Amino acid sequence: MAEVQQQDPMAEQHDTELFYMLVRMISTNALLALGKLAPEGQQPPPPDLEAGAAFVDMLGMLEAKTAGHRNAHEEQIIKSSLDQLQIIFVEVARKAGSETPAPEAAPGIVTPSGSAQPAAAAPQPAAPAPSPAASKPAAPSAPSGPPPEEKVKYRKSYGES
């Protein structure tokens, strides 16, 4: 007969605290990368959308990989953190896109492989209703240009060269 192991309530509470600390750590790094949080006594850095997207993606991966293994409190912690970060990411990406003369793609979450994923929980502006006088169908939009080149942002340096 298989024996069912009972988990100690104190150990489960400790695991929930550790889970909260992990989610908070990833969220804090995402906010730093997106320029929404600054180290004490300093100005917020300019947003780094690639790094911000990586942290948001990490939190999304954590949510997916721990599905079915979280208690109700852990579920609420990760869902609210991920939702808030996705909204902040979209806002920062839109603001960064409005400062550039011609954005090449709609804002989304860019994975480290360079593929774009749509950001969830982002309110989209309503499209204007077509006027009754417009009888011609709209022309299809032209595909955007080539994908943007990946830039190396950081390089290791082991002394002066």
Image (cartoon, rainbow, N blue to C red):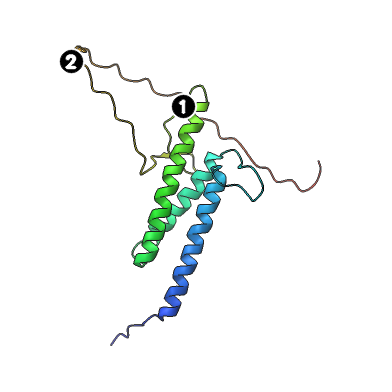
Residue 112 makes an appearance in the image = no
Residue at disc 2, secondary structure? loop
Q: Alpha carbon of mark 1 to alpha carbon of mark 2: how far?
A: 31 Å
Which of the 4 image quadrants contains residue 78?
Answer: bottom left
Instruction: Point out the image quarter for the C terminus.
Output: top right
Residue located at (53% from left, 47% from top) = 31
Image coordinates for residue 127, horizontal then vertical, percent: 29, 26
Q: Would you say 117 lies left or right of 18 here? A: left
Residue 140: x %, y % from top left: 31, 19
Answer above or below: position of 96 versus 8: above
Percent position (x, y) of residue 98?
48, 27
Picture layout, residue 134 above or below residue 156: above
Q: Are marks 1 and 2 in contact (CB under 8 Å)?
A: no
Q: Which label sits in the foreground, 1 or 2?
A: 2
Q: Earlier in the sequence, mark 1 or mark 2?
A: 1
- The amino acid marked with disc number 1 is Glu
Name the image quarter holding the N terminus: bottom left
Instruction: Tell me the tag on residue 132.
Output: 2
Q: Report the front residue among 39 and 141.
A: 39
Extreme-bottom residue of the structure: 1
In percent of width and height, residue 22 lies at 50, 61
Q: How many marks?
A: 2
Q: Secondary structure at mark 1?
A: loop
Which quarter of the picture shows residue 66? bottom left
Residue at mark 1: 104
**Nearer to the camera, 157 or 70:** 70
Q: Which residue is most to the front?
A: 41
The crowd level at tag 1 (other Cα within 10 Å; few <14, some 14-19, many 20+) is some
Identify residue type, mark 2.
Pro
